[in-house]
């Protein structure tokens, strides 16, 4: 008798085919879409990436952070600081921003991991506030009112505006694809198995020999790294930065949480579905302003109370679809005598 | 003399922070819930007081007679209809629901009252001062606010350890299942705890509104100050919470005195130092 562990079902092949078609179509977007389309798509990519990362943190590792804006802002400020102080090309600064955030996240993790559960959540928020206030003190980066990216740095990306738009769009697409691939690979690795065990029961996981704290710290650092790269890209596209925008709890955490909850927390498809719903709502209701945000809060609360697994959780329960090959299946084959 | 003034101001503001913290600490103690909307509820109470003072033409301190029961009723209903449904082993639902609530309150207030900042007028008491010694003066209002904060903490301490309600709170906190077996209805106990928490929030909200300008976006910062006071003081200790509020207030006053940009930052740094060196807080609950 042999025992094999395989990933995936037939739906994964459909998922892979859909993914490949979508990626090809999106990579060709500069040839079929206008400037606004590219900007909207880039924004969607950024939110898919941020929500997927938050989902990894909260949905899998059980680290409910409301302070990921700390790393969005840190990444963005690192990019601006490298460009303004050292004249480094913004394209090089994106990976460096990730590296800086990963280094900073280590002492931060040691500090906030002393807090449990809900207290961890608010602790991460305070860290983000500290970063915001420190950024407001940095006079060379414009202090509280912020600063713009120097024109020379903008031209360094690409000589013409159209080429710049294309370059930044492709970077956004590449980053979101890389983040999703990273998460899929992580979840398929040993750490992924450990993470799913932690998600389902922390006690059972640690009884089975999973080093829960170590796994959580690794996920926290990886998430900080990727979140900062996305943050750097978001503000590279805006060309302007200020402490309130870069460390905004609403933009980079509240929306991200609502997206994940609406789409389905603890499933990799959830943040993607949630982002599409979020942008569909925004494109139709954004004129309502504050009422739109109010409705978003109400929808998130209703989903949490009535369908806590979100839209994709419902789809999985109803139809059993999985677009990503993550489910481990044990195959037992009788050996012929 | 200058520094004595700074520290006195810090201590007096710290009383307000202790009131922010007491409601938060109470809820966490009884049902292990951190209410992310706590700060927004404080700002909501300030707006309720604004409406009450304007429609009835009474002073803010008199308005407490109406604001406190209104906020307590909101708390009871909130717990009964919404938050009780989120409690369980999973900590995500209560966190996300109170986070959603925070966004709803902020934007609801923004839609009703705009982003313009407002203030409650308390009349002559606002500018009255007492002379302590040469060059050291304290305002009557901050002093009253501090006295009320101490009274609120003492009152909560009394309710917790000397009344049947407090016994129900402590029993449910220790073991909800056994408390239920002894005939307590946990849902009702939780609803009463939230009502009590929001009664404290109402008092804190009115003093906040008299002290300075407020607007709908100020909630999260109040939550953070309250939270810092709880952690600095030590979980589960009401007097510790008061001490935590005072330390935070003094840290902010010293920071502000050195450089106005450092006021809030100094408070956060004090919090992070305590977290790094003494994560259980300065005055944690002793024994059981």
Image (cartoon, coloured by chain):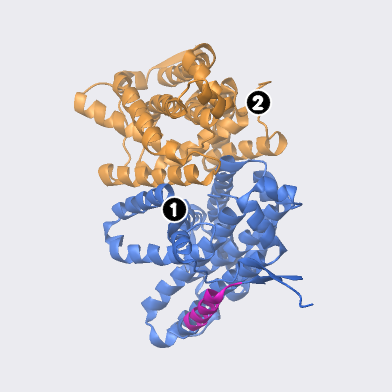
Chain colours: A blue, B orange
Chain of the residue on which disc 2 is drawn: B
Quarter of the figure with the N terminus of chain B? top right
Residue A295 visible within the image: yes
Residues in magenta, as a range: A8-23
Residue at image coords 66%, 27%: B282
Using the image, tell me which numbered label, if any, was put on residue B284. Answer: 2
Q: Distance between the residues labelled 2 and 1?
A: 33 Å
- Is the stretch drawn in magenta largely helix, strand or loop? helix
Q: Position of residue B260 (x, y in %)?
A: 52, 40
Does residue A257 appear left or right of residue B103 in this picture?
right
Q: In this view, does A62 lie above or below A141?
A: above
Name the image quarter holding residue A3.
Answer: bottom right
Which residue corresponds to mark 1?
A: A250
- Pick the residue in front: A132 or A109: A109
- Res. B246 visible in picture: no
As drawn, the residue found furthest toward the right would be A337
Q: Where is residue A64? Give x, y as percent.
A: 56, 49
Task: Give the residue at the far bottom of this rendering.
Answer: A31
Q: Mark 1 lies on which chain?
A: A
* Magenta-span inclusion, residue B155: no
Where on the picture, by quarter, is residue B286? top right
Image point 54% across, 28% down: which residue?
B176
Local crowd size for mark 2, using a 10 Å CA cut-off: few (<14), some (14–19), many (≥20)? some
Say above or below: B164 vs A151: above
**Which mark lies nearer to you, 2 or 1?**
2
Are the residues flagged by discs 2 and 1 in contact, CB closer than 8 Å? no
Q: Height in image: B111 above or below A237? A: above
């Amino acid at each position: 008798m042999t025992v094999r562990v395989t990933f995936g079902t037939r739906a994964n092949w459909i998922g892979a085919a859909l993914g490949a078609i979508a990626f090809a179509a999106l990579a060709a977007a500069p040839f079929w879409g206008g400037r606004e389309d590219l900007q909207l798509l880039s924004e969607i990519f950024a939110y898919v990436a941020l929500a997927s990362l938050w989902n990894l943190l909260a949905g899998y590792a059980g680290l409910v952070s409301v302070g990921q804006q700390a790393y969005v802002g840190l990444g963005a400020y690192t990019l601006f600081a490298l460009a303004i102080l050292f004249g480094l090309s913004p394209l090089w600064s994106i990976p460096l921003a990730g590296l800086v955030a990963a280094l900073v996240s280590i002492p931060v993790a040691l500090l906030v991991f002393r807090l449990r559960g809900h207290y961890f959540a608010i602790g991460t928020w305070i860290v983000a506030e500290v970063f915001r206030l420190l950024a407001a003190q940095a006079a060379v980066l414009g202090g509280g009112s912020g600063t713009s990216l120097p024109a020379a740095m903008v031209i360094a990306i690409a000589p013409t505006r159209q080429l710049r738009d294309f370059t930044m769009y492709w970077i956004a697409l590449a980053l979101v694809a890389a983040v999703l691939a990273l998460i899929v690979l992580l979840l398929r690795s040993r750490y992924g198995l450990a993470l799913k065990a932690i998600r389902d029961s922390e006690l059972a996981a640690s009884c089975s020999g999973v080093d829960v704290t170590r796994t959580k710290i690794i996920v926290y650092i990886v998430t900080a790294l990727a979140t900062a790269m996305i943050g750097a890209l978001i503000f590279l596209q805006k060309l302007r930065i200020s402490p309130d925008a870069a460390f905004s709890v609403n933009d980079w955490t509240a929306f991200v949480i609502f997206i994940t909850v609406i789409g389905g927390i603890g499933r990799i498809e959830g943040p993607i579905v949630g982002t599409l719903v979020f942008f569909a709502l925004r494109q139709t209701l954004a004129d309502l302003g504050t009422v739109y945000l109010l409705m978003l809060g109400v929808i998130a609360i209703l989903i949490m109370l009535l369908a806590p697994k979100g839209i994709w959780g419902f789809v999985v329960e109803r139809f059993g679809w999985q677009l990503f090959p993550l489910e481990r299946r044990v195959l037992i084959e009788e050996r012929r005598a | 003399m200058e520094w004595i003034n700074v520290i006195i101001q810090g201590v007096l503001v710290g009383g307000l922070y202790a009131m922010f913290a007491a409601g938060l600490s109470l809820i966490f103690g009884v049902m292990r819930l951190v209410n992310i909307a706590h700060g927004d509820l404080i700002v909501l109470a300030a707006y309720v007081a604004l409406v009450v003072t304007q429609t009835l033409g009474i002073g803010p301190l008199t308005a407490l007679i109406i604001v406190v029961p209104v906020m307590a009723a909101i708390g009871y209903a909130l717990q009964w209809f919404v938050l009780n449904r989120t409690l369980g082993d999973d900590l995500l639902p209560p966190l996300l629901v109170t986070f959603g609530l925070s966004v709803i309150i902020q934007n609801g207030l923004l839609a009703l009252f705009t982003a313009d900042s407002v203030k409650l007028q308390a009349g002559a008491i606002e500018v009255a001062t007492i002379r302590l010694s040469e060059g050291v003066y304290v305002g009557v209002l901050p002093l009253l606010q501090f006295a009320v904060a101490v009274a609120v903490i003492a009152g909560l301490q009394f309710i917790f350890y000397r009344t049947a309600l407090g016994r129900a709170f402590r029993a449910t906190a220790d073991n909800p299942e056994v408390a239920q077996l002894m005939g307590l209805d946990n849902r009702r106990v939780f609803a009463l705890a939230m009502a009590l928490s929001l009664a404290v929030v109402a008092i804190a909200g009115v003093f906040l509104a008299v002290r300075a300008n407020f607007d709908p976006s100020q909630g999260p910062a109040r939550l953070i100050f309250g939270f810092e006071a709880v952690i600095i003081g030590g979980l589960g200790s009401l007097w510790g919470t008061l001490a935590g509020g005072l330390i935070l207030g003094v840290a902010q006053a010293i920071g502000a005195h050195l450089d106005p940009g450092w006021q809030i930052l100094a408070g956060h740094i004090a919090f992070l130092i305590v977290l790094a060196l003494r994560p259980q807080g300065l005055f944690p609950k002793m024994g059981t």
